[in-house]
Image (cartoon, coloured by chain):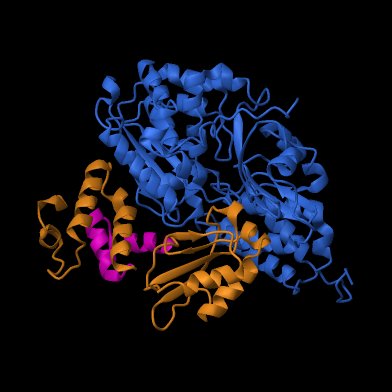
Amino acid sequence: MTSQNGPMSESAKTGVAASAPRLSAEAEARIDDLQSRYPTKKATLLPVLWEIQNSEGWISTEWMEYAADRCEVTPSHVLSVVTFYTMFHTKPVGKYHVQVCRNICCHMVGAPGLIEAVESRLDLKHGEVSEDGKFSLEHVECLAACSWGPVMQINRTMHENLTPESAVKVLDGLE
Amino acid sequence: MDWSEAVTRVLFEHRDAKDVHTFEGWKAVGGFSALEKALKMKPEDVVEEVKAAGLRGRGGAGFPTGVKWGFIPKNTDKPIYLCVNADESEPGTCKDRVLMEDLPFMCLEGAIIAAYAIKASMAFWYIRGEFDLPERRMRAAIETLREKGLIGKNILGSGWDLDFVIHRGAGAYICGEETGLISSLEGDKGQPKIKPPFPAIKGAFGCPTIVNNVESLAAVPWILRNGAEAYTKLGTEKSNGTKLFSVSGQVNRPGVYEVEMGYPLRDLLENECGGMKRGRALKAVIPGGSSMPVLPADVALKTNLDYESVQAAGSMLGSGGMIVIDDAQSMPELLKILGRFYSHESCGQCTPCREGTPWGSRVLDRVADGAARADDLETLERIARFLSGTTICLLADSLAMPIKSFFQHFREEFEALVPTEAGEKSGG
């Protein structure tokens, strides 16, 4: 049975309630396309999880069940995968997810001062989300931009060659 | 050897050409002529050409690329897969990012030629999850080639079909290890698998699979266009061609540079990178990514950049992620950062690594933070010993090598932080 049969095929197959989450028609079509190319449905688990996180911002238990159904694996397998990869969020993050590199190359060119300035400006520590949900902060490992450090990535946008002052300016410019 | 002549460029030959990141721009500098040539050859002859060029894997291991391709079983009835390793994650390394951002069609042309050589029907571009522009560039490039008929059915009338998809990682260093990458591609945690069987025999989905680094594949179009012999004329006798080095640290012009194999490290630092920043002196260099042994300045400055010379100096060329350490840096502090990194990235499947890397990290934390115990250095040496060669993949060794080499060359900095029996720090 494939999910290309129609919008209700998962619920018909598994008995998941009719209110089970669904992605946009475009996202569903992208997943269908990938599943027609990949050798197994399980192999599309990471792409499916990305579709979920791109749409919802994080991956809840309900969405893990959706992914399990879509990729024909158990929900516990999905949980093991979601929690293995650091970029998948199991709780909401801020509208702006700020990631500051703490690894060796950025460290040598000023990451400690940058991290201090960002923490102070946002009043957040590693792993915290601001009360208004605007910002979350994470110290991350190498972002493969070592020649342009220190770096900070906000959502998917990379900011390079930062100083504490220029980093605060970037943060202050976000609406 | 006289290095005053301009270095012949292979990977960056056309980097400055107009719009070279677009299909038209790449075509304008002769792009896809290598693919056209390859598709008129027998796949076996393409493999032989790359073997003859002596191209070695640029992800870190340095294994000959053509030889690896030759490991695909003949007359297998299973589908064959190509996985492009674009999971660039080794601290210090940012060369594949530049190739994908600036020359996506060159990278793809090399990958398609590789897929043809190994008779793959499907290829995956495994790209690290944090990459934004590189992913957009590669995604757009694949779509364009699909429209142009260079990916899909009966490519250029050859009768050969190839599908190509981007597979985005999600933040796990270990997926840069080829069997970890395969696990991740299969929809599992990115845990490495025991070799043998090697991926060429039994890889992704149980089928013959070749995993190649982006930079290795990016050299293939040049080799096909100019011939294997031209490539062997570059570099040293055993390390052919050119290599990208991504230089980081307190130098005047950090960046990604292409040099011929055998180029003196001193020249790269002084010419390309413009020397150390004012007021900073060179203390040490990690030549090939953070897992490789560190070299003190005097040794590093006498080293040439090819596989054999760097090994003779006591380290490895690795990925070419060159971490330049200046005299303001504390070695215990840097090693503490590496301890945290490898501990964070352990996949958890082998006991020595799962338990040993966090243990090592905790000890390194307290040494660097001034809370060392009298026997901490011996403990770290013991941890480094049991992290060496006891696990499925090299992640555990990747912490052991820095611990051993930092101790070998900079032991006094660590000893100064450890209390003597009388309860005082030996450094006073």
Q: Is residue B175 above or below residue B215?
A: below
Among the 4 quarters of the image, the one containing residue B114? top left
Q: Residue furthest front?
A: B18
Q: In this view, does B264 lie above or below B293?
A: above
Region rendered in magenta: A59-84
Q: In the image, residue B355 lies at what x, y percent? A: 58, 62
In the image, is B81 to the left or to the right of B192?
left
**Is A79 colored magenta in this rendering?**
yes
Q: If the image is split into quadrants, where does the C terminus of chain A sit? A: bottom left
Q: In the image, residue B109 lies at what x, y percent? A: 41, 31
Colour of chain A as rendered = orange
Q: In the image, residue B31 lies at what x, y percent? A: 42, 28
> Does residue B68 appear anywhere in the picture?
no
Q: Which chain is blue?
A: B
Q: In the image, residue B409 lies at what x, y percent? A: 80, 52
Q: Residue furthest bottom?
A: A131
Q: Is residue A16 above or below residue B15?
A: below
